[in-house]
Image (spheres, helix red, strand yellow):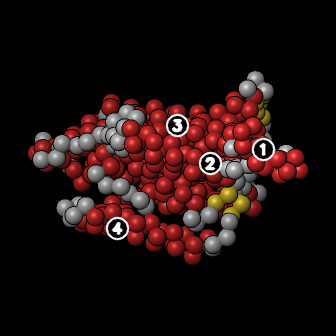
Amino acid sequence: MDIFLQQVINGLTLGSVYAIVALGYTMVYGIIQLINFAHGEVVMLGAMVAFTVITTLVGAQVPLSPLLIVLVGTLAAIPVCMATGYMLERVAYRPLRRAPRLAPLITAIGMSIILQHIAMLVWSRNNLAFPQIIPLITFEVAGATITAVQIGIILISLALMAGLTYLVYRTKLGIAMRATAENAPVAALMGVSVDRVIASTFLVGAALGAIAGVMFGSYYGIAHYTMGAVLGLKAFSAAVLGGIGNLAGAMVGGLLLGLVEALGAGYIGDLTDLCRWPLVSGWFSERCATDGHLILFGSNYQDVFAFVVLILVLVFRPSGLLGERVADRA
């Protein structure tokens, strides 16, 4: 039971990061029906900028507490990511808004590659050890262990999800976003500045991505110029799993994907240990007698396990768990 609870804690932590990144994907898709594949690189830039600021402050021995140093790094990363998100929308996507759907998709992939190589030139191709300056404080919960960093990630993610929900459903900007997503030409006739709303959507998504990048780096203790590719792909899968364009779907999909990965990593080794299956172990009796284990799939297959679940869900429910948000285009 303690192993199960531990994997649930790990899954909720990872899923919280996936959910925050997935919100950036689903917001943009809900507004302009575009998959912004460069969003993962925006997350990566957030982690890299925070890494630079934190290491600089630590190296200069600035008299600030560890939490304040991480906060300063995050506050420095947010405007950089927002500027990058605005640049992507203004330069790469806005001119192609009326182009065939394939053109902005290819452009998004191209911008992703460009941002990766810019980051490689600035921060090198080596893995960067993200400063682990927050004291390792652990708490015991029914035999499982949860750290202060994990608690912080989960609570911050929940606060961001609640804040974004309030923004979308309780503010004028949110009303304009929903009107633009429903029917952009009619929203423009009603006085909504569609270009400004779309730009604001990219800015909000980029800010969330910056925070997610810092959380990911703080949790895993590493940053790399390609980290946004896999993280972005998983977050996009989480958005599709929950229902692309659906805010609640992105949250649920992110948390569910994180849980599936963690539980898969924790149990897939035992489930695929051929020596545990009487009908099969006889064929490998010599190997089982020598090693005691003959594991077919180890924890390194957790990504495969997660995507298999995604495929199964989409086969039986193509619109995602909570349904895809489909705009009514005139």
Q: CA distance from mark 1 to mark 4?
A: 52 Å
The residue nearer to you, when weighing 208 against 8, is 8
Q: Position of residue 304 (x, y in %)?
A: 57, 51
Q: Are marks 2 and 3 in contact (CB under 8 Å)?
A: no
Task: State the SS at label 2.
Answer: helix
Q: CA distance from mark 3 to mark 4?
A: 29 Å
Mark toward the start of the polypeptide (2 vs 3): 3
Q: Amino acid at mark 4?
A: Ile
Query: Among all residues in the image, which is located at the extreme top?
Result: 142
Residue 151 in view:
no
Residue at mark 3: 256
Q: Position of residue 98 (x, y in %)?
A: 19, 61
Residue at mark 1: 282
Task: State the SS at label 4.
Answer: helix
Residue at mark 4: 106
Q: CA distance from mark 2 to mark 4?
A: 29 Å
Q: Amino acid at mark 3?
A: Leu
Mark toward the start of the polypeptide (1 vs 3): 3
Q: CA distance from mark 2 to mark 3?
A: 14 Å
Task: State the SS at label 3.
Answer: helix
Residue at 68% in and 39% down: 271
Residue 226 in view:
yes
Q: Amino acid at mark 2?
A: Gln
User: How busy is the neighbourhood of tag 1: few (under 14 within 10 Å), some, or many (20 plus)?
Assistant: few
